[in-house]
Image (spheres, rainbow, N blue to C red):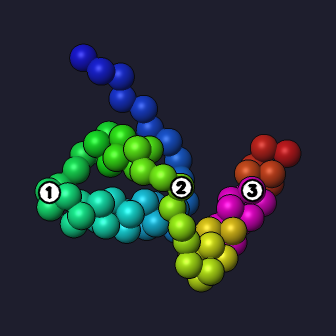
């Protein structure tokens, strides 16, 4: 039996992961479990982001760091 781990992520991060999962599923033409998704994701080269997506990711990271600092400071 494998261990199961849960992580907390923001809704924005969850949506980004779901979009990427859907993109990979469409590319390989089959549904993926989350384990399969992360294995596929880690096999890929570093994604090349559009300037808009890059800015969105920077904003999400900044917001999450701010929340983390408030929560654990």
Query: What's the residue at 38%, 63% (across, down)?
Result: 20
Q: Could you say which disc has been placed on residue 19 in the image?
A: none
Q: Earlier in the sequence, mark 3 or mark 1?
A: 1
Element under label 1? loop
Query: What's the residue at 50%, 42% (across, down)?
Result: 7
Q: Residue furthest top?
A: 1
Foreground mark, 3 or 2, reads 2
Image position, residue 3 (x, y; %): 35, 22
Tell me if I can see residue 32 in this picture.
yes
Q: Are marks 3 and 2 in contact (CB under 8 Å)?
A: no
Q: Could you say which disc has been placed on residue 46 in the image?
A: 2
Q: Residue furthest left?
A: 30
Element under label 2? loop
Crowding near the residue tagged with mark 2, few <14, some 14–19, many ≥20 C-alpha atoms within 10 Å = few
Element under label 3? helix
Work out whether 44 lies above or below 64: above
Q: Is 8 placed left or right of 73 in the picture?
A: left
Q: Residue furthest bottom?
A: 52
Q: Is 55 placed left or right of 38 in the picture?
A: right
Q: Could you say which disc has been placed on residue 30 in the image?
A: 1
How far apart are labels 3 and 1 at the CA level? 35 Å
Image position, residue 60 (x, y; %): 64, 67
According to the picture, the residue beneath numbered tag 3 turns out to be 65
Question: Magenta stretch: dominant SS?
Answer: helix
Work out whether 51 lies above or below 14: below
Q: Which residues are magenta?
A: 59-67
Assess whether residue 41 is covered by the magenta stretch: no
């Amino acid at each position: 039996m494998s261990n199961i781990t849960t992580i907390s992520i923001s809704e924005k991060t969850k949506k980004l992961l779901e979009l990427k999962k859907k993109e990979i599923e469409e590319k390989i033409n089959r549904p993926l479990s989350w384990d399969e998704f992360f294995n596929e994701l880690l096999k890929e080269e570093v994604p090349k982001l559009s300037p808009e997506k890059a800015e969105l990711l920077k904003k999400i990271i900044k917001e999450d760091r701010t929340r983390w600092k408030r929560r654990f400071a």
